[in-house]
Amino acid sequence: MPSHPVGWFEIYVDKLDRAKYFYESVLNVSLEELGDLNDSSIKMLAFPFDMETYGASGSLVKTPDVFAGGNRTLAIFPRMTLP
């Protein structure tokens, strides 16, 4: 199985319901709420992911500390071992 070029991504949004509707409609997927966060002011909706297939997963994030736009997308790359 190929490795994932991106391990996780977060798209920061101001209007979570609007972003959920947009991504579910365009990508034909269902986003699921990530529960049990230590900070109840942060809301996250996860994109579906299958560990047996190629690709990365991530979430939409609504937080009072980070606003949408202006390069507010986070990509986490897996640790790589160089030869």
Image: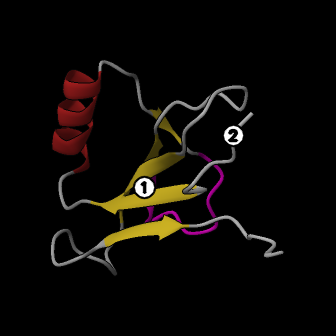
Amino acid beneath label 1? Lys
- Residue 74: percent from left, percent from top: 42, 69
- Label 2, residues with CA under 10 Å away: few <14, some 14-19, many ≥20: few
Give the magenta range. 35-44
Does the magenta run of residues contain 74?
no
Name the main secondary structure of what is drawn in magenta: loop
- Residue 68: percent from left, percent from top: 20, 68
Label ID, residue 43: 1
User: Which SS class for mark 1?
Assistant: strand
The quarter of the picture where residue 34 lies is: top right
Horizontal side of residue 2 vs 72, given as left or right: right
The quarter of the picture where residue 26 lies is: top left
- Residue 6: percent from left, percent from top: 55, 57
Residue drawn at 20 percent across, 23 percent down: 25
Instruction: Give the Cα distance between marks 1 and 2.
Output: 31 Å
Look at the numbered discs 1 and 2 and tell me whether their residues touch, using CB distance below 8 Å.
Answer: no
Q: Is residue 5 above or below residue 27?
A: below
User: Which of the marked residues, 1 or 2, is nearer the chain's N terminus?
Assistant: 2
Nearer the viewer's eye, disc 1 or disc 2? 2
Q: Is residue 25 above or below residue 80?
A: above
Does the magenta run of residues contain 39?
yes
Horizontal side of residue 17 vs 64, given as left or right: left
User: Which SS class for mark 2?
Assistant: loop
Residue drawn at 60 percent across, 33 percent down: 54
Residue drawn at 68 percent across, 64 percent down: 78
Residue situated in front as seen by the camera: 14 or 77: 77
Amino acid beneath label 2? Pro
Residue drawn at 57 percent across, 55 percent down: 5
Residue situated in front as seen by the camera: 53 or 73: 53
Residue at the disc numbered 2: 2
Horizontal side of residue 60 vs 56, given as left or right: left
Position of the N terminus, as image quadrant, is top right
